[in-house]
Amino acid sequence: METFIAFWNILKKDIKNYYLKPPNISWGIIFPLSWTLMQLIRSSGNIDVIELLPGLMAMSILFGTTSMLAVTITFEKRSKSFDRLLLAPISLSTLVAAKILGAILFGIINAFVPVVFMGFLINLSGINWAVVLMAVILIAITSALLGLLVAVSVKEVFEAQTLSNFFRFPMLFLCGLFLPIDKLPAALKPISFCLPLTYGTDMLNSAIIHNSYFSILFSIFIIIVFIIILFYLCRRNIEKKWIL
Amino acid sequence: MQKNVEIVKVTNLKKLYGDLPAVNGISFSIKEGEILGLLGPNGAGKTSTINMMIGLSRPSSGQIMIDGIDAIKDIKKVQRIIGVVPDENNLYGEMSGFDNLCFCASLYGMGKEEREKQAKELLKQFGLTKAADRPFGTYSKGMKRKLTIAAGIIHNPKILFLDEPTTGIDVESTRQIRELILNLKKQGTTILMTTHYIEEAERTCDRIAFMVRGEIVKVGTVRELMENIDHEYKIKLQLDNCLEELKVELENKFPSYRIEVLAKNSCLIISKEQVPLSPILQVLDEKGVSVYEAKGIKPSLEDVFVRITGIDATKLEKVGR
């Protein structure tokens, strides 16, 4: 019960202090909306609008989640308020889980902004929502952990943004969002298979446009493996870098 | 309230950063209900020592036992019974004083009712009730320091670690904080405090450990530390003239005295024996120098610190508070 009280209050504090702040709410809405409009204008009727949805959702989660977590944690570490959390009698795993949950929820909400927008333009009845939700949650968790991994590796807020972009953009181009995995050059395919977003996007493709490269179960399994590895790396790096 | 039980025991504690020792094999203990002060200049290893004891840093070697628990092996158990006030005010700027305290209490698993009650009590005790709903970021330095201390004790810790509690704050807040520290001691809290203010250590600590270049060079009560140095008698004379020219003549006349000429027409007469004033006054009178004031000066903890560590006490950022 004591651990739950600490966990819940860390999460509540993060949501109130960071995620519910007007600039972040607007970021969470404007960013996915801009991507949607950009894609719609670019496609100019050449592709089915629904084909854009998996990519838009994946990008919204990836950018929303990684940005928020990398910046907020770097900020807390810099102001030393993160030390207060490290001094609490809760395990490091509980602390990591509490810190990433806020970002995960933020990412999930971000993901559904383009869905709501698309809902006004096209018929969304053929979508497998259970798989969509599962994919969104899994992408949000991996993105949050990637954000945390970035936060642990840097000291300054601007470094967090730079390092985030270093992996976010290559990931976007190689995960099958812009170019289907089967059309990627042979040399890039192995890299694509090493990216968690590849499997999340593939799940979204399967649920929304019924076209996927991997089976859903295989993608879920791979993403869970990524989550376990990333969680372990985050925990280890916090211990190594922040408990000197 | 002080008991004869060693609640904290540090043995051969060492912290290396590369080859550089920040803390070099220190050993000390703290009795239950005692205030131990770690006194030393910046970079002496005081904060590194505290960080190892509270779990923010890993020792290179050595042992830390806190209330019978091995702090290196089981730091989370230790963190349950300790409170920490870091040298920087690290509460959340955008949250109110009240919310900050409630949040800190929640980290120790305290229920909503209990933490709100405790937060209100502490705000009252620290004179911050009126500022309870204001964001922490808008507080003055003194108020921030007080709230940071309140956050460190909200869960009623058995042992409190205070890192430079009064650095950089005004005289009134310093006085209030020192009173609060002494009140905590009265309530039975064991305190380890670091400071570079000699006067603060002298006023608040039961025992003081002098720490220099990662080593503890001396530990004891103020009296024990004072007894440790060769006693010298000092008399400060306030004159109507500078004594520079007469210094050698006086020292020749009174070979057992050492004379130090100070600024503003004053001088110090230092001797191993008590100094009879009349012969000196007579000589000065003959030379046409009037003496307005003669004051006996007792050795201070500062003298002891300088004598033991060889460090110029002004480097401790001593302030006249």
Image: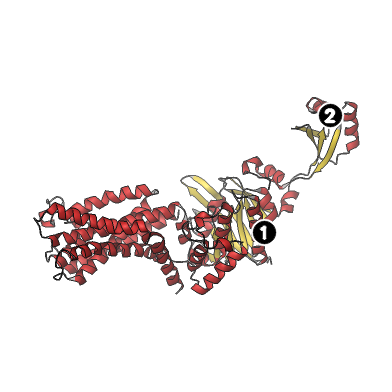
Q: Is residue A116 left or right of residue B168?
A: left
**Around disc 2, counting alpha carbons within 10 Å, would you say few (fewer than 14), some (14 to 19), or many (20 or more)?**
some
Distance between mark 1 and mark 2 Cα atoms = 47 Å
Where in the figure is residue A206, as x and y percent of width and height?
15, 66
Where is residue A125 shown, x and y percent of the image?
A: 15, 71
Residue B319 in view: yes
Colouring of the image? secondary structure
- Residue B281, by quadrant, is top right
Disc 2: host chain: B
Please report whichever mark, 1 or 2, sits nearer to the chain's N-terminal start: 1
Label 1 sits on what residue type?
Answer: Glu
Residue on which the image places disc 1: B179
In the foreground, B161 or B184: B184
Q: Say which residue label 2 marks.
A: B250
Q: How many marks?
A: 2
Residue lying at 72% horizontally and 53% vertically, measured from the top left: B222
Query: Height in image: B108 above or below A41?
Result: below
